[in-house]
Image: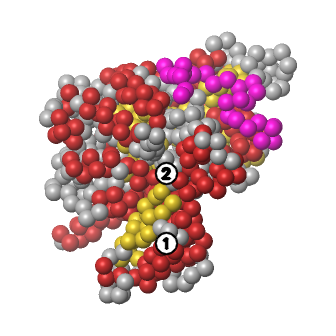
């Protein structure tokens, strides 16, 4: 009798372990690109990260430095603040897109002009190794490998991550794009400015 | 006096001195390698090979010393000291490449040793920073988040106090913050991964949220490292040199982050119970080399690895002092060198002072470490040590040494 009990207990254990593994599998790691070029841009980025973290199905992780970048699309637009963020989420990519759009709406982005000014823009750049392409969502983000304002912040937090379509690491994509544009040094990219929050930005180099 | 002895340690100093007396430019190229002397120690060489090396070196006007029994082949193996100018050592390498008896392999080894010894390690990118070695020494601020360091009065961590302390170190110009949740002091008990995460994660999150700091996670556990890297850390500092947790190397390769591997004899709990070495520097280098091998197998790039001799980790005071004196020998690994001496017991023992009185002693060790090749120093007293670092740097990084992009080749 006691023997049987033990077996039953073991089986229960096994079941539990299996369930746990499955649970872990259901958690995806996603990389988001954040951008804002209206009002208190850094505050909008903060707000977006805060709201993402408030969602019970999202755990917010590491974030890149904020970069100020000149807009690519429209001539007279004010410059953007761009950053990249990693999250863990139980949501499917489409559900995650809904959440992002909700936050964009909450923070007042009006989707009027596609390339127009925006209080906050949240793009899903990558989601594990998934490749998705329908009329609502494209992952990996179809333009990410051409955009230094995406690649540079993303390379800070995920340099080794491999782009599932192009099969190159983020750092490689960044370096390639940089040299395509004829740039050599990180700190001399045209239209780029690192926004430093730390207290050591005026540290004299020697 | 019509003369004096001048110290010439490397090729660029030799070239400078030659140019200073007006040597012909073509002559400088030819003569400089003859002005620099090096002694290379090779271990476990077969007597046949050792004898050939000795003979070749003698023919070039150099020397190679073997164990007594090497000449009549009465020993199975011998250690070898090969001494000569860079020119003679180059000639030796060329000659050995055409021999047999494993000599071409030894030639490659010697060639690699000389190359590593003379190059400046490649820059390492961490987060938004590039550590450009050879131009200055970087400062890693220590943030121990253990209940005895940042207690809230009970057994919990006061996160705000820990983050505030890290910010203070950043304001004092620390280049990065090393956050650790497990005490590695001699005799300390290990803590569980759960407990370690509970301690470090809130602090890392807070720090990553409020500053641009480069955060390093000081842990031996892959589980802790993984959570910390997600929460905001960008580098791993593993005092076990990838040994305690077999998952660690895999994780680091996957995440593509830089890692610092350290030498330790034993574990923090038992490491100070009569540590002994037959060949201190040789054993440390061997251990770190094995660590590099583990890293390589897992797919970690050599250029992402920093090495640390592990001052105070399974070493007596005499061992620690010898390591600081001979730190340069670690350059043979071709990696940037991190040294952590801050407030450690070797200072306490030499000066007979308690931990809160070790700042000057730490300053001395930091200065010597930098003079002997340290690229990163791990310290508690960032404000004071930043001055020591800057001052020492001003002395040792003379203009010829610090010409940007200069990569010496022996």
Q: In the image, what residue occupies the spot 22% across and 50% down? A: B318
Q: Is residue B54 magenta?
A: no
- Above/below status of B374 relative to B386: below
- Residue pointed to by mark 2: B335
The residues bearing labels 1 and 2 have C-alpha atoms spaced at a distance of: 29 Å
Helix, strand or loop under label 2:
loop
Q: Is residue A181 magenta?
A: yes
Asked if badges 1 and 2 are on one and the same chain, I answer yes
Which image quarter: residue A70? Answer: top right
Q: Position of residue A195 (x, y in %)?
A: 61, 22
Q: For mark 2, name the chain.
A: B
Q: Position of residue B206 (x, y in %)?
A: 42, 27
Front: mark 1 or 2: 1
Q: Secondary structure at mark 1?
A: helix
Q: Chain of mark 1?
A: B
Residue that badge 1 annotates = B57
Q: Which residue occupies the foreground of this view, A178 or B347?
A: B347
């Amino acid at each position: 009798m006691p023997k049987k009990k033990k077996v039953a207990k073991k089986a229960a254990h096994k079941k539990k372990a299996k369930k746990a593994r499955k649970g872990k599998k259901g958690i995806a790691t996603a990389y988001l690109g954040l951008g804002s070029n209206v009002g208190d841009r850094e505050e909008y980025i903060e707000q977006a990260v805060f709201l993402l973290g408030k969602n019970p199905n999202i755990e917010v992780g590491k974030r890149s430095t904020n970069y100020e970048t000149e807009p690519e699309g429209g001539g007279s637009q004010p410059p953007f603040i761009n950053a990249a963020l990693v999250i863990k989420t139980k949501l499917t990519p489409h559900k995650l897109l809904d959440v992002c759009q909700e936050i964009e709406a909450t923070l007042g982005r009006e989707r009027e002009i596609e390339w127009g000014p925006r209080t906050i823009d949240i793009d899903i750049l990558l989601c594990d190794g998934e490749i998705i392409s329908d009329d609502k969502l494209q992952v990996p983000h179809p333009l990410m490998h051409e955009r230094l304002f995406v690649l540079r912040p993303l390379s800070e937090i995920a340099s080794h991550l491999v782009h599932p379509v192009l099969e190159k690491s983020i750092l490689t994509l960044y370096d390639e794009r940089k040299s395509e544009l004829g740039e050599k040094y990180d700190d001399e990219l045209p239209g780029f400015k690192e926004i430093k929050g730390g207290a050591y930005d005026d540290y004299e180099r020697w | 006096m019509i003369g004096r002895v001048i110290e010439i340690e490397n090729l660029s100093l030799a070239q400078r001195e030659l140019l200073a007396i007006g040597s012909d430019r073509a002559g400088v190229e030819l003569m400089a390698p003859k002005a620099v002397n090096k002694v290379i120690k090779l271990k476990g060489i077969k007597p046949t090979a050792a004898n050939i090396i000795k003979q070749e070196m003698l023919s070039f006007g150099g020397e190679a010393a073997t164990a007594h029994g090497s000449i009549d082949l009465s020993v199975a193996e011998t250690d070898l000291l090969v001494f000569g100018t860079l020119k003679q050592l180059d000639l030796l390498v060329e000659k050995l490449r055409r021999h047999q008896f494993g000599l071409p392999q030894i030639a490659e080894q010697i060639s690699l040793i000389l190359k590593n010894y003379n190059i400046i390690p490649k820059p390492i990118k961490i987060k938004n920073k590039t550590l450009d070695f050879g131009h200055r020494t970087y400062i890693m601020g220590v943030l121990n988040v253990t209940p005895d360091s940042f207690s809230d009065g009970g057994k919990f961590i006061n996160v705000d106090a820990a983050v505030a302390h890290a910010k203070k170190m950043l304001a004092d110009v620390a280049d990065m913050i090393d956050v650790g949740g497990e005490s590695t002091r001699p005799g300390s008990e290990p803590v569980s991964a759960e407990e370690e995460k509970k301690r470090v994660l809130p602090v890392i999150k807070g720090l990553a949220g409020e500053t641009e700091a480069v955060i390093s996670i000081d842990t031996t556990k892959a589980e802790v490292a993984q959570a910390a890297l997600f929460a905001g850390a960008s580098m791993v500092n593993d005092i076990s040199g990838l040994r305690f947790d077999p998952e660690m190397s895999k994780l680091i390769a996957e995440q593509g982050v830089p890692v610092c591997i350290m030498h330790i004899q034993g574990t923090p709990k038992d490491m100070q119970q009569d540590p002994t070495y037959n060949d201190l520097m040789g054993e440390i280098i061997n251990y770190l080399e094995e660590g590099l091998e583990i890293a390589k197998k897992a797919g970690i790039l050599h250029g992402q690895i920093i090495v640390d001799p592990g001052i105070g980790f399974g070493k007596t005071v005499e061992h620690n002092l010898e390591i600081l004196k001979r730190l340069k020998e670690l350059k043979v690994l071709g990696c940037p060198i991190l040294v952590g001496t801050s407030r450690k017991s070797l200072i306490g023992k030499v000066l007979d002072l308690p931990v809160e009185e070790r700042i000057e002693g730490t300053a001395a060790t930091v200065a010597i470490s930098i003079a002997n090749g340290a690229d990163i120093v791990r310290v508690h007293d960032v404000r004071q040590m930043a001055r020591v670092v800057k001052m020492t740097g001003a002395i040792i990084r003379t203009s010829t040494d610090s010409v940007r992009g200069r990569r010496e080749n022996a």
